[in-house]
Image (tube, rainbow, N blue to C red):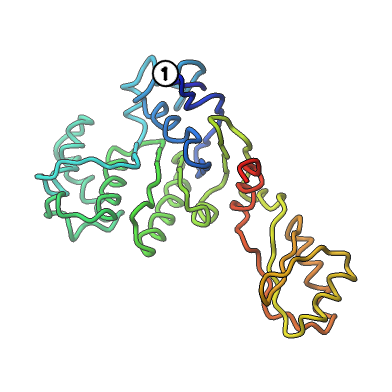
Amino acid sequence: MRRVFGDVVAVDDISLVARPGEVTALIGPNGAGKTTLMLMLATLLVPDRGAITIDGIDPVTDPRAVRRRIGWMPDGFGTWDALTVREVLHTIGAAYDLPAAEARARTEEVLAQVHLGDLADRRARVLSRGQKQRLGMARALLHRPTTLILDEPASGLDPRSRIELRDLLRSLAAAGTTVLVSSHILTELQEMADRAVIVAGGRTIETQAVDGAPRALRTWRIAAQDRTRLVEALDAAAVVWRAAGTTVDVDLAGDDEAAELLAGLAGSGARVTAYAPVHGAMEAAYLAATEERR
């Protein structure tokens, strides 16, 4: 797909497939084209070139049918400040032509899902940023979409709410929903996503299963009670190391290589006290794919 604004190429050549029953993570630096892509998927922008299908339907030729199938949560959530949380969702239900009784019942269901039941009668204007994010999620879920398109859904959420969001998205995917989520919080995406699409400069750089992310070199940090013996053991294993304060960093190609090295260090007398990757697997893959920005 391609989308241009004047002389600015926002999306140049991005392609991706988000599958039912999976959480697909869309990651990339600021200005990579992620939000523009999501706006096109949500029928709010028309691509200059390329094709989009959601559940086999083209959002350009039949946007109304696509909107009935997608739950869209933008990064900036707008609402009606004078309405209560419950009234906001009733209004959204009416916009989707849900029968009034169904809209009321569904409202209570999604309020429970996003843990907003105790705030149902508060005016939207008094909600915090995180509470508005949860209301945005409730709004996206109200009409039981088959596809969720979420732009930075964890922004403004406290740690507990982020964990609850992760669990909610995993449960929705397990029930067959297609979930496409963009976020800069790569450690959280690592825990919830099945597949990662890395974009930069308006182009798809790499697509991989999250389980395959460790193929990229990752930096592991090692601490030991006897640093001299640790360094000697690394030299003997022909492992290139770098001092990192009182610890040592090494670059390893995967978990198998890391496990083999640790087994060797166990018999070295160095007495290893800490051994862990500096970055998560998804962070490592992202850093490797965007190496040219260094």
Residue 165 in picture, x, y percent from top left: 39, 55
The residue under the point 17% across, 33% down is: 94
Q: Nearer the viewer, residue 72 or 203?
A: 203
The residue under the point 12% across, 49% down is: 84
Examine the rendered structure and indicate whether residue 111 appears above or below residue 18: below
Q: Nearer the viewer, residue 155 or 84?
A: 155
Q: Quadrant of residue 35?
A: top left
Examine the rendered structure and indicate whether residue 10 appears above or below residue 273: above
The residue under the point 43% across, 56% down is: 167
Residue 117 in picture, x, y percent from top left: 21, 57
Q: Mark 1 — residue? A: 6
The residue under the point 20% across, 36% down is: 93
Q: Give amino acid for label 1.
A: Gly
In the displayed structure image, the side of residue 107 where residue 56 appears, left or right: right
Neighbour tally class for label 1: few under 14, some 14-19, many 20 plus, Cα within 10 Å:
few
Q: Nearer the viewer, residue 149 or 94?
A: 149
Q: Secondary structure at mark 1?
A: loop
